[in-house]
Amino acid sequence: MAANQSNIADGHHRYTTALTYMQNWKSKTGGALPPNHRQLRMFALIGMQDDGLLILPTHRLIGNIESFNIEAFSSAAEKVFDVTGVAVAPRALPHTSTINSPKPAAHRLACTMGDPNAVSVDLQEPRCAKGFGAESERSLTRLDVAILQRYLLDEIIQPNFAGTKELTKRYTAESEQVVPMTDGAKSQIALLLKSTPLNALEQLGHHNEVMPQKSTYFFPKLATGMVMDPVGV
C-alpha cells in the first residue's frame, strides 16, 4: 500500500453517515454548513504491518430453517462444494474450520446443528468465481465470508432449507458460544469461519470494493468513551 493511502477497516458506517450529513446540509444551504459543524471526525490510524493487529472470525448463526440434515445439505451443495463430515468433540468445535482433512482446501469452514459430535463439515474449493465482478473476483473469491454469503446461504441453504421464509442471521466472534446459541429455536445451524486475511482487506480496497457484512472483528479494541458533539438540526 502506498504511503499516502489509508483503508477504512472499521467504522465505515460512521464515516459514510458523516459524509451524508455534510452533503445534505450543503444541498439545503447552497454549500454552507451550520456554524457549529466541523468537517473533522476522530479516528485512529494503525499500521497494517503491526504484529499486534488481529482479525478474528465472526461466526454465523442461521435461523428460520424448516428442516436441515447433513445428507440433504451434502446433496444440495455437491455441484459447488465437496462436503466431508467430521466428528469432533465439543471443546474442539471452535477450531473445526482449521481441522486437518485428507484433501487440501482453499476454503474451509464448519457447520453445526448444535451437536458437535455429528455435524461438522469440511467445504473444499468452490467453483464459483463467475459469480463475482471481473475487477474484484480474484480478491472476493479468496474470502470465505463472501463465498458463504454468495453461495452457501443465498443459493444452497435459503432455497433448499428455508422455503419461502427469509433466513435470520445472528453473529458472534466468541466461538465458545456457538454451540449454546445454536439452540434449535432462534438458530438451527451455525457456520464457523476462519479469520479474514488482512491482505484481503487491502486488495478489496484497491478495487474499490467493500468487505461483506460482518466479515471482520478487529482485536484488540480501542479504549472507548462518550463524546458529545452538538450538530445543527
Image (spheres, rainbow, N blue to C red):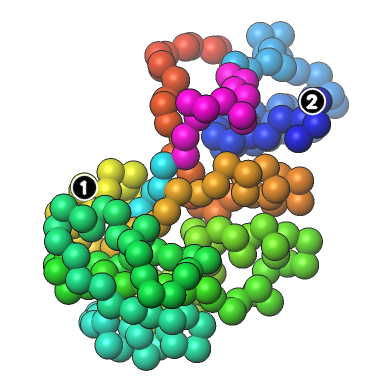
Q: Is residue 51 magenta?
A: yes
Mark 1 and mark 2 residues within 8 Å of each other at the beta carbon = no
Residue located farthest toward the top when viewing the structure as drawn: 35
Q: How far from the left and from the top, in percent, is residue 210?
A: 64, 49
The range drawn in magenta is 44-55
Asked whether residue 12 is in view, the answer is yes
Quarter holding the C terminus? top right
Main secondary structure along the magenta-highlighted residues: loop
Q: How far from the left and from the top, in percent, is residue 111?
A: 30, 68
- Quarter occupied by residue 212: bottom right
67 vs 28, left or right, is: left
Q: Residue at x 67, y 42 (%)?
A: 202
179 vs 37, left or right, is: left
Q: Nearer the viewer, residue 163 or 156?
A: 156
Mark identifier at residue 104: none
Q: Is residue 205 above or below residue 50?
A: below
Q: Is residue 109 magenta?
A: no
Q: Which residue is mark 2?
A: 3
Q: Which residue is mark 1?
A: 176
Q: Residue at x 62, y 20 (%)?
A: 45
Q: Secondary structure at mark 1?
A: helix
Q: How far from the left and from the top, in percent, is residue 19?
A: 69, 31
16 vs 11, left or right, is: right
- Quarter occupied by residue 44: top right
Give amino acid for label 1: Glu
The 10 Å Cα crowd at callout 2, few under 14, some 14 to 19, many 20 or more, is few
Q: How far from the left and from the top, in percent, is residue 103?
A: 43, 75
The mark that comes first in sequence, 1 or 2, is 2
Q: Is residue 175 above or below residue 17?
A: below
1 vs 16, left or right, is: right
The 10 Å Cα crowd at callout 1, few under 14, some 14 to 19, many 20 or more, is some
Q: Secondary structure at mark 2?
A: loop
